[in-house]
C-alpha cells in the first residue's frame, strides 16, 4: 500500500485523522509512538530548527532532505508542507515528483505569493495569488503525480489575509474545480468561530483540513460535530515543546551550577539509545563483524 493510500485508508476508517508536526526523524518517531495518524513535515518547524524566520528562507533541498530522512525512519504517512510550491506551476511539477518519489503521502500548497510570510505573524505581509494562477499550480500538481492516491491539498489563506469568508469559499470552490483532494483553511482568530462559519457554509464535495494553532479550544469532539473536517494538523507543537523543555532544563543547570538536580527529571541516555535502535546495531555487529 502506498503512503497516500494508507493516509486515505486511515481517514476512511477513523473519520478524523490527527497529524503531528515534526522537524526531524526523531520527532517523527516520537509522534508515531504517541499514536498519531501521520506526520506534518512542517516548514515552520524546520525554519525554527535552523534559527530562521518562516519566510521562504528554507530551500526545497533542505526541506526535502528532512522529509526523506523522516520517511526512512517512520512508517507513517507524511504530509509535506511545501508552502507556495517553491515557485510557479513549473516548479510545482518538479516539487510533486520529488516529494512523491522520496516518500511523502501528500503535500499542501498555499495560495500566497512567493516569498511567503508565516501566517500567524502579527502584521505580517499576506499577499495572495490570483485564483486562475493558483488553479494552474493545482492542475500542474495533479499532472505531475504518478500515484493517484498521492494527495494534493490546497490551502487558502483568504481568512489569514483578512479577505473574509465569501472570498475563502470562492477560492476553495475554485481549487476543488482544479482538482484538489482536500481544502486546508487557516485562521489566526483566537476562537474557532471563523473556521466553524466556513465549514458550515462549505458546499463542496472534498473534505476540509484545519490547523487549530491559534484557536486551541477546537478539540476533536467539537471538530467531529461539524462533520466536514477529516484532518486536523497540530502545526508547531513539536518545536514549541522542544524549546520549552530546553529552556527549562538549561536554566536549571545554570541556576544549580551543574546537572545533579535536573538529571533525574530528564530521560536517561538509555532512552535515547532505544530511539536510536541501538539494539539493532548490536545484533548486526554480533552477526556480521568479524
Image: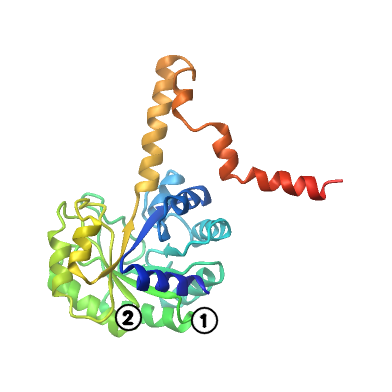
How busy is the neighbourhood of tag 2: few (under 14 within 10 Å), some, or many (20 plus)?
A: many
Q: Single out the mark in the foreground, 2 or 1.
A: 1
Give how far across and how far down residue 185 sits, in percent.
25, 66
Quadrant in the picture for residue 127: bottom left
Q: For the residue labelled by badge 2, is the local secondary structure a helix, a strand or a loop?
A: helix
Give how far across and how far down residue 39 sits, in percent.
43, 59
Quadrant in the picture for residue 173: bottom left
284 displayed left or right of 233 = right
Residue at the far right in the pictured view? 290
Is residue 160 something one can see in this rendering? Answer: no
> Label 1, on which residue?
146
Is residue 18 shown above or below 259?
A: below
Q: Residue at x 49, y 17 (%)?
A: 260
Give how far across and how far down residue 216 sits, in percent.
22, 51
Q: How does the figure colour the protein chain or chains?
A: rainbow
146 or 174: nearer the viewer: 146
- The circle drawn on residue 135 is 2
Is residue 90 shown above or below 246?
A: below
Amino acid at each position: 500500500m502506498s503512503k497516500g493510500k494508507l493516509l486515505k485508508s486511515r481517514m476512511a476508517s477513523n473519520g478524523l485523522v490527527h497529524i503531528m508536526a515534526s522537524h526531524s526523524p526523531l520527532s517523527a518517531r516520537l509522534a508515531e509512538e504517541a499514536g498519531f495518524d501521520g506526520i506534518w513535515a512542517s516548514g515552520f518547524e524546520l525554519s525554527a530548527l535552523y534559527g530562521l524566520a518562516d519566510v521562504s528562507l528554507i530551500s526545497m533541498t533542505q526541506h526535502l532532505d528532512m522529509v526523506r530522512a523522516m520517511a526512512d525512519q517512520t512508517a507513517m504517512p507524511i504530509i509535506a508542507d511545501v508552502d507556495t510550491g517553491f515557485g510557479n506551476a513549473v516548479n510545482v511539477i518538479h516539487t510533486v515528483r520529488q516529494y512523491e518519489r522520496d516518500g511523502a503521502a501528500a503535500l499542501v500548497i498555499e495560495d500566497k505569493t512567493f516569498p511567503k510570510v508565516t501566517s500567524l505573524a502579527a502584521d505580517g505581509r499576506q499577499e495572495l495569488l490570483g485564483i486562475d494562477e493558483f488553479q494552474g499550480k493545482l492542475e500542474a500538481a495533479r499532472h505531475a503525480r504518478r500515484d493517484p492516491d498521492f494527495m494534493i491539498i490546497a490551502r487558502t489563506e483568504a481568512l489569514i489575509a483578512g479577505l473574509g469568508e465569501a472570498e475563502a469559499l470562492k477560492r476553495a470552490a475554485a481549487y476543488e474545480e482544479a482538482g484538489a483532494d482536500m481544502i486546508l483553511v487557516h485562521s489566526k482568530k483566537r476562537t474557532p468561530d471563523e473556521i466553524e462559519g466556513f465549514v458550515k457554509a462549505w458546499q463542496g464535495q472534498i473534505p476540509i483540513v484545519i490547523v487549530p494553532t491559534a484557536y486551541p479550544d477546537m478539540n476533536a469532539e467539537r471538530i467531529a460535530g461539524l462533520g466536514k473536517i477529516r484532518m486536523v494538523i497540530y502545526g508547531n507543537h513539536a518545536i514549541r515543546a522542544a524549546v520549552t523543555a530546553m529552556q527549562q532544563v538549561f536554566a536549571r543547570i545554570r541556576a544549580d551550577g551543574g546537572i545533579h538536580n535536573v538529571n533525574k527529571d530528564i530521560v536517561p541516555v538509555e532512552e535515547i539509545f532505544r530511539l536510536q535502535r541501538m539494539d539493532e546495531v548490536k545484533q548486526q555487529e554480533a552477526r556480521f563483524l568479524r
